Amino acid sequence: MTFALTIVAICASGLAILHVLRLSTASRTVDMALAWFVGSGWFALGAMSLRFLAGVPFSWPAASAIVLAPFPAWAAMRARSRQDAPVSGRRFPRPAWVFAPVGAYVFFILLVVILHGANTPTHTDDGIRVRAFAPILAFDGAWGTEARGILVTAGPVTTFVPAFAWMFTGTVDHFHANYFVLTSLIAIVLLAIGLGTSRGSPERGWASAFGLLSVPLFVYNCTSTYGDAVLAIFIGTAILFSIEYGRTRDMGDAYRAIALLAAAAMVKREGEIVAISVAAVIISQLALEWRRGTRFPVLPIAIAALAVAAAGASKIAAVGLSEAFPLLKLIAGRAKNAGAVEAMGSTSIHSKALSVFWYALFRSGNQGMVYWLLPAAIAVRFRAVLKPCFGWPLAAISLLLAETAVSSVWLVPEYTVNETTVHRALMVVSVPAALWIVALLTDNAYSSESAVAADNTGSNPPGDAKQEKWRQFKWI
């Protein structure tokens, strides 16, 4: 019950921010899902900044102030804000004999994951370290030197949002860390379905949910409190809106992707590098289009950059400059020692890591069929890949895959060889890739014009009904 209050508070705050920034859509489902991600990022940023930049303890009054802060601005803008028309049109995919099993699969997997995740003890596989340790530290305010390092590793989003739930009762409930991951999973599923339905293709929406829930290790990790699944979810939502921007040319979709990436930068220590990489691709796309005469969104990018900078400054205030960005420190150390390692001829571990990484991509099954389907889909629909709605997101996914490969093979090969992290690290690539594959394969599968015409007329001529049905159901 207390976490339900947290969901309401975070979503309400997120909705206020969406309206203030004019990022709300015409779909209530999309807005509510988007509000969870934006609200989580806002709350985490506010809590961490207050605690480490302003020295304000994380407490009930401080948490309440963060949640309520966007509402005055929303109230001031509401009278002159544009009201989007409600979405109308088809809500159910066609043909039913194909998508009824798809819908059943989505509901079944979600139900199993929720039941499993809500009843899974919040501990790691070794049964020693508690995954909810960072939220516990936030709740207790026990920010010693080692505790602050844990915060940097976990990230403010997965640290402060579950701890907010405990403010209602004043007691720790480890399962709230599980509920946070489950809520994020439900949010991205609703977002995928809602985007497809509100944009004229419920088939694409339900197929996206199917593809998302068909990545085995991702689904399994959503029943735990590892942050890898959460980071994959945040990046996946940004990729969804990046694809939508290429399709609709609505700058609002690009803004939403950038806002989601700002929130993703606050998930895990890897979040910053991963989110900045995807953001760089989106900004490059916007810059290229600006040279062709479109407007360049300076203000939205500046706001997102300011949020990421504030989170970075909070980390520096917490642990110091040298420890605030451990990945950069690790990269510098690895580069410094690279010459010595090569001189000693100790490169076998990198060869082993490359072999394990290849196995993780194509043979382990943890990523499902993603890395078999990705090149196949590109080959089959190569002309569609050249469209901006697919080409730029594919560039972002390729960059993520390259970063993961460098990290797994060169940066931390020892953890790849013993398969400690390589499979979880790939989820941040697999989830966006699965969503991209589905979007590519369902592109132009259904004609929006014919669907609208069918809805307006109510029926097709008897002689053309069967032919029209199969003309719409064209996947490639």
Image (cartoon, grey):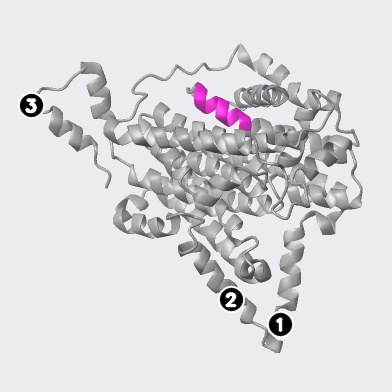
x then y, percent, for residue 3: 70, 26
The local secondary structure at tag 3 comes to: loop
Amino acid under disc 3: Gly
Mark nearer the N terminus (2 vs 3) = 2
**How many labels, in total?**
3
Amino acid under disc 1: Val
Amino acid under disc 2: Lys
x then y, percent, for residue 168: 79, 23
Vertical position of residue 38 compared to residue 443: above or below:
above
x then y, percent, for residue 400: 55, 57
For residue 182, which numbered disc appears in the image? Answer: none
Magenta segment main secondary structure = helix
Quarter of the figure that contains the N terminus: top right
Vertical position of residue 165 compared to residue 311: above or below:
above
Q: Name the residue located 64 percent from the left edge and 82 percent from the top edge.
A: 347
Residue occupied by mark 3:
463
Q: Is residue 219 left or right of residue 165?
A: left
Residue 255 visible in the picture: no
x then y, percent, for residue 252: 52, 32
For residue 352, which numbered disc appears in the image? Answer: 2
Q: Residues within 10 Å of mark 3 (few under 14, many from 20)?
A: few
Mark nearer the N terminus (1 vs 2) = 1
For residue 341, which numbered disc appears in the image? Answer: 1
* Disc 1/disc 2 C-alpha distance (Å): 15 Å
Q: Residues within 10 Å of mark 2 (few under 14, many from 20)?
A: some
The local secondary structure at tag 2 comes to: helix
Out of 22 and 368, give the one closest to the viewer.
368
In which quadrant of the rendered view does residue 51 lie? top right
**Magenta-tinted stretch:** 28-36
Q: Name the residue located 92 percent from the left edge and 48 percent from the top edge.
A: 144
